[in-house]
Image: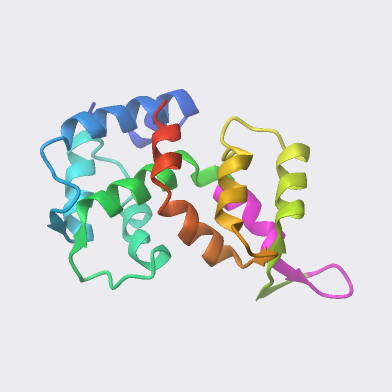
Amino acid sequence: MHRDFEYINATMRNRRAFLSTCTRAFGSFSDTDEVVIGDLYQLVSLLCPSFPEARILELPRLLKLDPAAKMPFGDLRVAFTVHFAYYDFLLSIKILFISQDSEGGRRLEWKPVEIESARQFIVENPSEYHIPIEFLERSYQQEAALEFDVLVYHLLRDEKLALEAVK
């Protein structure tokens, strides 16, 4: 508690410890309590004053919700947990979804990615920050390929993945 963001974000172990602290600190909130995203930021910043506000303020966009609207605390808790624990993974896998032009240059166009490409990425780039493959596969469900924002949307709503993040 009251550690700098650099410390709580430095290792997966530190992230899990911080998330456990958040779980205990936010225990009085019911999953059905309605809060705005700013409320979540204020709560998190009480535990880590240097926590980047932008990391929390992007959650409504990723969840396809109005940032000014009240949201169930349980949904925000799950999204915050997954987003914080696996942020580096989400940034690293994002490159799979960016289109390449014929000369190998990157364009800001998004393309759907098949689960096999995502699996291969995880195997070729091992890291403690990776989302376990079974959660990635569950996000794909019946889809042959997903766009990045759809994948993130599914992951940020996965209660079991949030529980995995704090183990």
Question: Would you say 7 lies left or right of 155 here?
Answer: left
Q: Is residue 128 shown above or below 108?
A: above
Q: Nearer the viewer, residue 121 or 99?
A: 121
Residue 11, can we see it?
no
Residue 123 image offset from top left, x and y in percent: 75, 38
Determine whether 126 is above or below 88 in the image. above
Q: Nearer the viewer, residue 114 or 35?
A: 114
Residue, far left: 28
* Residue at 64% from the left image edge and 52% from the top image edge: 93
Q: Is residue 12 located in the magenta-colored stretch of the structure?
A: no
Is residue 15 in view?
yes
Q: How many marks?
A: 0
Residue 49 percent location from the top left of the image: 23, 39
- Judge left or right: residue 112 versus residue 35: right
Residue under the point 58% across and 44% down: 89
Q: Quadrant of the C terminus?
A: top left
156 or 19, which is in the foreground? 156
Which corner quadrant of the image does residue 44 belong to?
A: top left
Q: How is the image coloured?
A: rainbow
- Which one is nearer the viewer's eye here, 25 or 78? 78
Q: Which residues are magenta?
A: 90-105
Residue drawn at 23 percent across, 26 percent down: 1
Please provide percent x and percent y for residue 19: 33, 33
Q: Is residue 139 left or right of residue 48?
A: right
Query: Residue furthest toward the right?
Result: 103
Give the residue furthest to the front.
142
Spot occupied by residue 145 in the image (x, y as percentages of width and height): 68, 65
Q: Is residue 161 above or below residue 114?
A: above
State left or right for residue 90 relative to residue 4.
right
